[in-house]
Amino acid sequence: MPARVPLDANTILAATEEILRRHGPDKATVVDVARALGVSHAAVYKHFASKQALREAVTRHWLDHNRDTLAVIAADRAVPPAQRLRTWLHAVLAVKQAKIREDPELFAAYGILAAAHSTVATDHVADLLGQLAAIIADGAADGSFRTDDAEATARAVFHATAKFHHLAHAAEWQNPGIGTELDEVCTLLLEGLQAPTSP
Amino acid sequence: MPARVPLDANTILAATEEILRRHGPDKATVVDVARALGVSHAAVYKHFASKQALREAVTRHWLDHNRDTLAVIAADRAVPPAQRLRTWLHAVLAVKQAKIREDPELFAAYGILAAAHSTVATDHVADLLGQLAAIIADGAADGSFRTDDAEATARAVFHATAKFHHLAHAAEWQNPGIGTELDEVCTLLLEGLQAPTSP
DNA sequence: CAGGTTACAAAGCTTGATACTTGTAACCAA
DNA sequence: TTGGTTACAAGTATCAAGCTTTGTAACCTG
């Protein structure tokens, strides 16, 4: 039976997202995806080397979207770096909270990837660290932050806010006080960053 | 058959620790503990209401030991608060790393408790927060730290160092760079705490 | 020959009978 | 009456059976 509309990677990706949403990350199978597309599951393997690769592609799609959303905040020179850093950190938390609420299945799929040490997850962290470093470098440039190594400082800020972005804490993000907690940590960190040059 | 040496809670506790070490937290059963003591498992239930209670007692024993170790550091007025805070945070990490290395089974038992929202775990966190607040209050008293609420600041510092004490990150504590990471976060936090009074 | 098909092997996952664990009850001894 | 016993019900873990799922191979078609 010939394919009338030739399948492409994007079509498969969209169907996979849909199946993941419906069935959940544990129950979703490659056969389900193929059935949704009206093809045999072997056809899917012509486009993706493995189920893992398919999962990674779906996750990467979401993470790329996140990265772009956050990049807009990070690059907004109209906002002073201190304010921008605070807003950005809140946004990192917010996009993840929203995903958990709206697409718990896809979020869980991301968790599975991160646990498997996929490069998709580590690449994403590197991306975020770059955005953070850029905000900090802006602050250093306009004199509002003091740092002699924006990347090292970005890492320290990232580690200090792990509770608000690391997957291991996802359960705590439901807690209503989480926003306030992040705010308090931001304030403390900003005081450290903004401190006048010390000895 | 009469008991020659009457069983007491401490004896059971010691035997339980031994069994947990040998069998691991998943395989260790109340029957195992009883067998090690040469009694029936029902005898153990005369002293502990449930297996959960037994597990909590063992964990509390270790946490109390930790608390005391850390309290010595927190209360050492000979060390300036900034240095003391840094040392204390490193010690919190170190005692957990040591436990994972030496008693992975008991450490896992603690993890199970924390996940079950046992008060043993939350009490311990409250203890640690108290010690942290005491160090910060000392710093406020001698002018080296600026804060108008030592407890709130303690919470912020605790959240900012979650990566270095929260169980969810235990796997990362094996990473050789973890000590340096904590040091960088400490430096940033101390700069925030030590900043001269801002507007 | 890119992109589809069916067929099939190996690995992984349910399932349900069986055995172990937990917790309780009724009873006994110093 | 405290602290032990044995016996047992209810809830869980285990394990081998078969069924799914993954991934590959050999083959077809515009």
Image (spheres, coloured by chain):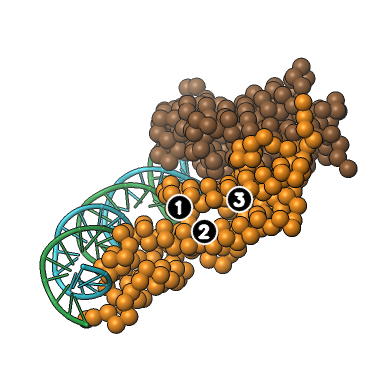
Chain colours: A orange, B brown, C cyan, D green
Image coords of residue A180 (percent x, y): 74, 52
| Earlier sequence position, callout 3 versus callout 2 | 2
Amino acid tagged 2: Leu
Whether label 1 touches label 3, CB < 8 Å: no
Res. A86 in view: no
Q: Residue at x 71, y 44 (%)?
A: A141
Q: Secondary structure at mark 3?
A: helix
**Residues at marks 3 and 2 on the same chain:** yes
State left or right for residue B95 relative to residue A141.
left
Q: Residue at x 29, y 82 (%)?
A: A4
Q: Residue at x 35, y 71 (%)?
A: A8
* Chain designation of label 2: A
Image coords of residue A50 (percent x, y): 32, 59
- Quarter of the image where the N terminus of chain B is located: top left
Q: Secondary structure at mark 1?
A: helix
Between C25 and B14, the one lying in front of the other is B14
